[in-house]
Image (spheres, helix red, strand yellow):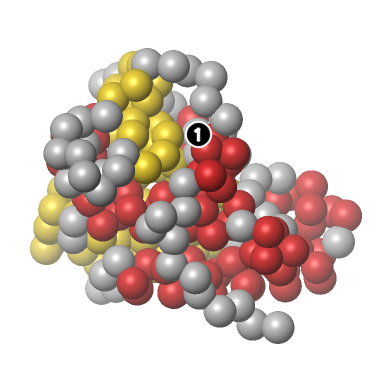
Amino acid sequence: MNRRLSTILAADVVGYSTRMREDEVDTINRVTLLNELIGTVAATHKGRVFNRAGDGFLLEFSSPVAAVRCAYNLQLQLAAPVTKREIGLEIRVGVHLADVVVDGDDLLGDGVNVASRIESEAEPGMVLVSNAVFDHAKRSAQLKFENKGTRKLKNISEPITVYAVAGELGTHSCGTALIEDSSLPYVAELQESTSSIVVLPLRT
C-alpha cells in the first residue's frame, strides 16, 4: 500500500439537486463547462482532478499554497461576469493537508474525507481550509484568512479549526493576514480582488 502527503481540494456545486430537477440538460451542460474550467485552473497550479462524481470534484496538489491559490482563483473566475453568464454555478471548496492512500490514479483515506467534510461547512463562494493548510499557506499564499473557529465534522473524531480565504493580502506584504471579522461578503470580496486572476477561455 503506497502512501503520500498531499493537499486535497474538495468542491461541489451549490443547489445541484434542485437544478437537476428543474432542467437536467442545462445543468449537465453547465457542470461540463465547470469541469473544464476546474481542470484548466488546476493545471496552472500543478494540480489534478483525481475523482469526480456528479457535482463533486476532488483535486490533488503537492503544495498547500498552490491548492489554496487554485481554489481562490477558481472562485474569482466563477464570480466574474463572463463566467457567471457562461457557467452560472456557485461552488463550495474545502482544502486539507494529509497523508493519503494511493490507489492507481485515485486517492483514499481519512484525509480525503476530512477535505470533503470541510467543504460541506463552507458557504457558497467560499474557500475553507484546515488549520494544517493554514499553517503552510498563511505567509506564502499572499491571502487574507478569517478564523472560522473549531468545527466538529461529521464522522471525524477530532475537531478541526478552519479558516476562510477572505481576499488578497498584497504582493508587498510578508506577514500573516489573519482577520477576525466573521461577516465578510465572500463573493463580493473576491470580485474586488483581481490582481492574481488568470483569464481562461471558455468554450462557446
Expressed as whole percent of the image width and height from the top left, the position of residue 42 reads 37, 67
Displayed quadrant of residue 179: top left
Expressed as whole percent of the image width and height from the top left, the position of residue 66 reads 26, 57
Q: Is residue 188 above or below residue 45?
A: above
Expressed as whole percent of the image width and height from the top left, the position of residue 10 reads 42, 50
Q: Residues within 10 Å of mark 1 (few under 14, many from 20)?
A: many
Displayed quadrant of residue 145: top left
Relative depth, front residue between 134 and 31: 134
Q: Is residue 23 above or below residue 165?
A: below
Identify the residue position indicated by label 1 in the image. Answer: 122
Relative depth, front residue between 23 and 139: 139
Location of the N terminus by quadrant is bottom left
Q: Is residue 51 above or below residue 114?
A: below
Residue for point 12% across, 58% down? 3
Expressed as whole percent of the image width and height from the top left, the position of residue 79 reads 60, 52
- Answer left or right for 18 relative to 58: right
- Specify whether residue 189 is in view: yes
Q: Amino acid at mark 1?
A: Ala
Displayed quadrant of residue 24: bottom right
Is label 1 in a helix, a strand or a loop?
A: loop
- Answer left or right for 31 relative to 65: right
Residue for point 71% across, 68% down? 86
